[in-house]
Image: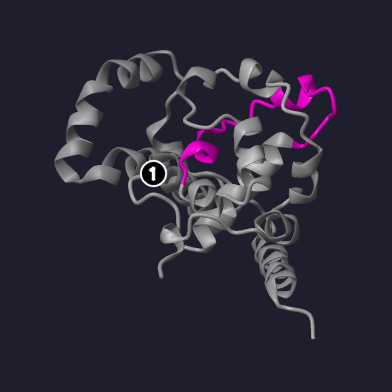
């Protein structure tokens, strides 16, 4: 039976507490809805945060992990600032998204996830984001012709940036890099090692 065909999973709250960043706080949500009302994308959520948290507590594993709602979070932290219980809602939403992605349950068409992966790969190569490569990757994410069309549509903005001296072609091609490349790689490798150790079941 596939993961998405499992309607209810009574141990789902425990699973979230053990595998999702800050997941232990889910049970503390009092369903006031302030998070949904504070979110700039509130009207566009299929399931606002407090609804997702209730679904977790109700054991609706497939519905939660197969949802695209947690990918809507833009990390503005309005919900965290206004939450009466000061729950780390942003971290939980990103944690649910990460966990869903690890299990392969994220919806196939998910632009936010695709951009997140693109951004992460870009910035971890040198420790700094290469704006040109990131922009090109974003434009051509949906194919060559789609990239050409997006680039052409944005030509006015690009020319405006060049005229204002905010866009330097040489700097874009060269990109910015951090000095201690070895240190960055060691830090990322250590973080990956800790993450793998955390996932490993206790003996």
What residue is rendered at 33% in x and 46% in y? Answer: 109
Q: In which quarter of the image is residue 110?
A: top left
Callout 1: few (<14), some (14-19), or many (20+) C-alpha neighbours within 10 Å?
A: few
Return the residue nearer the eye: 137 or 8. Answer: 8
SS state under label 1:
loop
Relative side of 152 to 64, left or right: left
* Nearer the observer, 53 or 73: 53
Residue under the image location 60 percent in, 20 percent down: 39
- Name the spot of residue 31 as percent of width and height, x first: 72, 27
Identify the colour scheme used: one colour
Q: Which quadrant holds residue 115?
A: top left
- Residue 100 in the image: state x and y as whole percent: 53, 55
Q: Can residue 124 be seen in this view?
A: no
Quick check: 195 above or below 65? Answer: below
Q: Which residue is pictured at 62% across the width and 51% down the height?
A: 59
Front-most of residues 107 and 132: 107
Looking at the picture, how far across and down is residue 43, in whole percent?
49, 18
Q: In this view, does 108 lie to the left or right of 125?
A: left
Residue tagged by mark 1? 110
**191 shown above or below 138:** below
In this picture, residue 5 sits left or right of residue 124: left
Q: Where is residue 86 in the image (x, y as percent from the top left)?
A: 83, 29
41 to the left or right of 12: left
Tell me if residue 165 comes above or below residue 8 in the rendering: above
Q: Of residues 80 and 57, which is closer to you in this image? A: 57
Q: Give the range drawn in magenta.
A: 67-88
- The N terminus appears in which quarter of the rendering? bottom left
Residue at the far bottom in the pictured view: 203
User: Could you tell me if residue 199 is visible in this image?
Assistant: yes
């Amino acid at each position: 039976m596939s993961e998405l065909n499992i309607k209810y999973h009574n141990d789902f709250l425990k699973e979230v507490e053990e595998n999702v960043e800050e997941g232990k706080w889910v049970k503390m949500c009092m369903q006031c809805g302030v998070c949904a009302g504070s979110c700039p994308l509130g009207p566009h959520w299929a399931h606002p945060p407090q609804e997702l948290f209730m679904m977790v507590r109700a054991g609706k594993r497939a519905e939660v992990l197969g949802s695209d709602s947690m990918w809507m979070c833009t990390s503005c932290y309005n919900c965290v600032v206004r939450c009466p219980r000061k729950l780390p809602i942003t971290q939980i939403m990103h944690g649910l998204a990460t966990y869903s992605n690890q299990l392969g349950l994220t919806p196939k068409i998910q632009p936010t996830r695709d951009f997140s992966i693109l951004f992460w790969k870009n910035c971890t190569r040198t420790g700094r984001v290469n704006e040109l490569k990131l922009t090109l990757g974003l434009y051509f994410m949906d194919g060559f012709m789609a990239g050409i069309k997006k680039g052409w549509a944005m030509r006015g903005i690009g020319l405006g940036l060049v005229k204002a001296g905010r866009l330097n072609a040489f700097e874009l091609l060269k990109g910015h890099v951090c000095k201690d490349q070895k240190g960055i790689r060691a830090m990322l490798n250590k973080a990956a090692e800790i993450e793998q150790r955390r996932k490993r079941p206790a003996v």
